[in-house]
Image: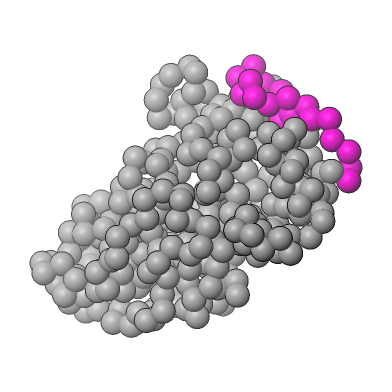
């Protein structure tokens, strides 16, 4: 059932510790999630039906270390399908054992995104999928090296010719990877089924948590819509040091009003993707609820919508139960 709600149907991959599998380029499960699962149809314009050769190529690229400078790291090394396409550690390790600067975000429902990365560095998914490849800490393969390496590869060279009718280019590499990532969906949760009329889909605690989410907890103000994110940036004080916010989106825009602001992630799939926040500093959903219950961390830039919540311990547990129900 979980794989079906992920939009992957029976297609599953378990990564062995320290091992990145090389997948056949010419195989693509017939029941791969080509249709958005229930609950997402109103979340935004879903991508059209992809070309199967490009989807298979993107899938193979995602799991193969060919795109890292030393051929040791794949996209799936940090975006682990067995962990909601996130990473179970606060900071992933890139090439040469280097530590990433932020927690690896989940790729679930990124095909519905408007901005990408914690700071909105990329405006399109096709741009975003290339940035970790070029990043010297993460995969460290120069943009100018991508196409020649793939053209000379005995597996990927012919695969690009078959999928695009021409030798590999950096643009086509981004297109193939994005075509795959667009299909990493999660939906059809217990909450969706409850909202569609199956009132037994949520237990009493989860229903109470839903009421809190929609009322005094005010979660909906930022985690809005069917994908449970406003696709905007907010300053909550995560990672603040001595009351000083991290730069956040200010790094991209240079606007003082963006200092300390980071991307609002979807709440779908949360039970699969711990730890949480852009610094991976919160280990459990109870920790997340406690963080917002106290109004985040005190910084001058803190979003005006954040304030301490009057909430009992029982209510906090109910809210965490509702958040978990978005993953089952």
User: Is 94 included in the stretch rendered in magenta?
Assistant: no
Query: Which stretch is magenta?
Result: 295-314
**Residue 186 picture location, percent across and down:** 52, 61
Image quarter hosting the N terminus: bottom right
> Picture coordinates of residue 66 (x, y %)?
33, 68
Looking at the rendering, which quadrant does residue 15 occupy? bottom right
Which residue is painted at 34% across and 40% down in the image? 123
Determine if the magenta segment contains residue 305: yes
In this rendering, the answer to whether 257 lies above or below 215 is above
Name which residue lies at 11% across and 69% down.
Answer: 165
Relative side of 298 to 41, left or right: right
Check the image and name the residue furthest to the front: 197
- 231 or 211: nearer the viewer: 211
**Rendered position, 137 above or below 291:** below
Residue 133: percent from the left, percent from the top?
Answer: 36, 54
In the figure, 105 relative to 173: above or below? above
Residue 89 shown left or right of residue 231 in the figure: right
Residue at 67% from the left image edge and 63% from the top image edge = 198
Examine the residues drawn in magenta and state their main secondary structure. loop
Looking at the image, the residue that sits furthest to the right is 313
Instruction: Please indicate whether residue 198 sits to the left or right of residue 139 in the image.
Output: right
Name, please, the residue furthest toward the left.
166
């Amino acid at each position: 059932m979980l794989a079906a709600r992920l939009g992957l149907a029976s297609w599953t991959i378990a990564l062995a510790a320290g091992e990145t599998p090389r997948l056949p380029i010419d195989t693509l499960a017939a029941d791969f999630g080509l249709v958005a699962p229930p609950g997402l149809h109103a979340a935004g314009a879903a991508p059209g039906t992809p070309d199967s050769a490009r989807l298979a190529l993107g899938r193979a690229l995602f799991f193969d270390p060919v795109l890292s400078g030393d051929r040791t790291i794949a996209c799936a090394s940090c975006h682990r399908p067995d962990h909601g396409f996130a990473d179970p550690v606060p900071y992933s390790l890139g090439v040469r054992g280097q530590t990433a600067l932020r927690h690896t975000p989940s790729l679930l429902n990124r095909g519905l995104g408007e901005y990408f990365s914690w700071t909105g560095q990329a405006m399109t998914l096709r741009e975003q999928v290339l940035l970790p490849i070029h990043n010297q800490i993460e995969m460290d393969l120069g943009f100018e090296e991508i196409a020649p390496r793939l053209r000379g590869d005995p597996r990927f060279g012919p695969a690009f010719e078959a999928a695009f009718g021409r030798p590999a280019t950096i643009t086509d590499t981004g297109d193939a990877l994005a075509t795959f990532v667009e299909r990493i969906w999660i939906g059809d949760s217990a909450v969706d089924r409850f909202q569609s009329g199956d009132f037994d889909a949520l237990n009493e605690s989860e229903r109470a948590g839903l009421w809190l989410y929609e009322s005094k907890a005010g979660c909906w103000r930022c985690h809005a819509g069917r994908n449970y994110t406003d696709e905007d940036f907010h300053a909550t004080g995560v990672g603040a040091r001595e009351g000083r916010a991290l730069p956040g989106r200010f790094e991209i825009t240079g606007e003082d009003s963006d200092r300390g602001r980071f991307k609002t992630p979807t709440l779908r799939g949360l039970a699969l993707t711990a730890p949480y926040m852009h610094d991976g500093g919160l280990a459990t959903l109870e920790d997340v609820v406690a963080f917002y219950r106290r109004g985040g961390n005190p910084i001058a830039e803190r979003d005006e919508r954040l304030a301490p919540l009057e909430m009992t311990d029982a209510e906090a547990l109910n809210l965490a139960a509702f958040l978990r129900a978005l993953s089952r």
